[in-house]
Image: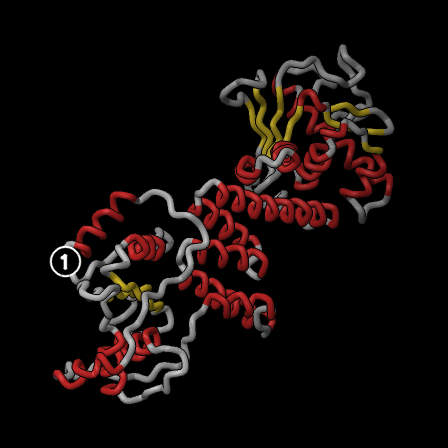
């Protein structure tokens, strides 16, 4: 055969193609294509690498063989040639395959001082990579998935299969299969992190899954449930609204009825609120009517999971409130840091004999002009006629926030308003 072409024989002292056990090529197929040679399997750094190929088809040849390396199965030459050069005549396709194999053999064996057949075995009929000499990130990813090591699987997945290479049918199908497996691993990693009481990690995994498929309602439902269990109902509803915007933009559709039902179960009654200004504080007349209306009982969302940690912060807030040191305490922090959950835990731990906590979600209140109606709705008992006048709402609010004593002769309880998502109010 002319120079530059594959000889069609595996060659070398170990013609059975099993290699001599020295040196390891690590082929990275996820997020691109790269091959690195390690003189021993435990070597910390490679001594050679291949990142550019003679042609893209030569790179795809390496990828096709590497994807089969764990099975140790040899692929017929005609099958490989037809897959990589589908538009060429059979003779021309086989010739191009021989040239690509010759180039690969030089990189995988000659350039690193390995004998022929130590990494690439080929004869007149078939071709394969040697399993003992080659490993791939795809095999590491799939092994972690099979073994249920979800976080290891997530770490192994560096991006879509053969990113930047042509979308041949076999590349596209394999890329989609691995991407679906990756999304499943992300959801499983989120579930494991949530069970291990690492909600921040769980939310991060679910958001990675949404980055892969922004229209996946199942992932949005998982994320909404996770955020709600952490007390961040407003954040859960923001995820729902964001999905709705994406669906309308992509397909002019709304979220599924099931997801709409989940949002309704999380959302308290929040009808459209009028724009009003706070009236001047009423005189003693309104306060004197307190006895005519039953005082409000404390209301908080149910705790779906146990609360762990943050004991120093909880003690500081309870001390400030219970000792009367402050009438207003603000919890500050980035989104998702658990401010709502911390506030609710403080409210639950305050002595019920001295405090009546009321949770007021403000995620639907865009500015301070609608604060009074939101407070009015939060404290109004079921069935009470709705009031539109600002002064009337203020009067009701004053009366309802007057707490009765838990027992005869005991001091009256103090009302604690837990205002969630107040940061957007001007």
In the depicted view, which residue is nearer to us: 186 or 28?
Answer: 186
Counting labels gives: 1
What residue do we see at 66% from left, 25% from top? 134
When the figure is inspected, residue 271 is found, relative to residue 81, above or below; the finding is below
When the figure is inspected, residue 121 is found, relative to residue 388, above or below; the finding is above
When the figure is inspected, residue 72 is found, relative to residue 161, above or below; the finding is above
Residue positioned most to the top: 13
Tell me the SS state at disc 1.
loop
Residue 381: tell me if it is visible.
yes
Residue 333: tell me if it is visible.
no
Q: Quadrant of residue 396?
A: bottom left
Q: Residues within 10 Å of mark 1 (few under 14, many from 20)?
A: few
Q: Which colour scheme is used?
A: secondary structure
What residue do we see at 79% from left, 26% from top? 2
Residue 22: where, in percent of width, then height? Answer: 64, 14
Residue 392: where, in percent of width, then height? Answer: 26, 87
Would you say 419 lies left or right of 54 here?
A: left
Figure quadrant of the C terminus: bottom left
Identify the residue under disc 1: 324
Figure quadrant of the N terminus: top right
Residue 394: where, in percent of width, then height? Answer: 23, 82
Q: Quadrant of residue 366?
A: bottom left
Would you say 212 lies left or right of 342 here?
A: right
What residue do we see at 50% from left, 43% from top? 195
Q: In which quarter of the image is residue 132?
A: top right
Residue positioned most to the bottom: 389
In the depicted view, which residue is nearer to us: 359 or 298?
Answer: 298
Would you say 214 lies left or right of 426 here?
A: right
Residue 276: where, in percent of width, then height? Answer: 26, 84
């Amino acid at each position: 055969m002319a120079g530059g072409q594959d000889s069609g024989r595996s060659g070398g002292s170990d013609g059975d193609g099993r290699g001599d056990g020295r040196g390891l090529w690590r082929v990275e197929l996820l997020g691109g294509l790269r091959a690195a040679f390690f003189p021993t399997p435990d070597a910390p750094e490679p001594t050679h690498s291949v990142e550019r190929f003679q042609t893209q088809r030569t790179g795809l040849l390496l990828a096709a063989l590497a994807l089969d390396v764990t099975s140790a199965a040899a692929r017929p030459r005609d099958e490989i040639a037809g897959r990589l050069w589908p538009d060429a005549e059979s003779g021309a396709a086989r010739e191009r395959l021989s040239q690509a194999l010759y180039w690969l053999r030089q990189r995988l064996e000659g350039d690193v001082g390995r004998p022929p057949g130590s990494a690439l075995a080929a004869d007149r009929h078939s071709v394969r990579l040697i399993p003992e000499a080659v490993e791939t990130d795809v095999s590491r990813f799939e092994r972690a998935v099979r073994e249920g090591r979800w976080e290891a699987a997530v770490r192994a997945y560096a991006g879509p299969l053969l990113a930047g290479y042509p979308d041949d049918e076999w590349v596209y199908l394999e890329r989609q299969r691995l991407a679906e497996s990756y999304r499943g691993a992300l959801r499983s990693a989120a579930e494991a992190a949530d069970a291990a009481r690492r909600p921040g990690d769980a939310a991060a995994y679910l958001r990675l899954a949404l980055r892969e498929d922004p229209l996946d309602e199942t992932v949005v439902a998982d994320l909404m449930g996770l955020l709600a269990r952490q007390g961040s109902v407003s954040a859960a509803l923001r995820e729902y609204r964001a999905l709705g915007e994406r669906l309308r933009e992509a397909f002019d559709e709304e979220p599924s009825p099931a997801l709409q039902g989940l949002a309704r179960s999380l959302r308290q009654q929040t009808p459209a609120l009028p724009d009003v200004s706070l009236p001047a504080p009423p005189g003693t007349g309104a306060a004197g009517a307190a006895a005519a209306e039953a005082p409000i009982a404390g209301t908080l969302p149910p705790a779906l999971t146990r609360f762990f940690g943050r004991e120093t912060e909880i003690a500081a807030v309870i001390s400030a409130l219970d000792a009367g040191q402050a009438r207003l305490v603000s919890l500050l922090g980035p989104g998702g840091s658990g401010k709502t959950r911390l506030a609710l835990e403080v409210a639950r731990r305050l002595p019920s004999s001295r405090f009546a906590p009321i949770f007021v979600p403000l995620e639907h209140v865009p500015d301070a002009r609608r604060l009074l109606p939101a407070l009015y709705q939060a404290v109004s008992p079921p069935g009470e006629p709705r009031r539109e006048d600002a002064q009337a709402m203020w009067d009701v609010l004053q009366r309802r926030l007057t707490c009765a004593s838990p027992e005869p002769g005991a001091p009256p309880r103090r009302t604690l308003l837990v205002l969630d998502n107040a940061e957007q109010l001007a």
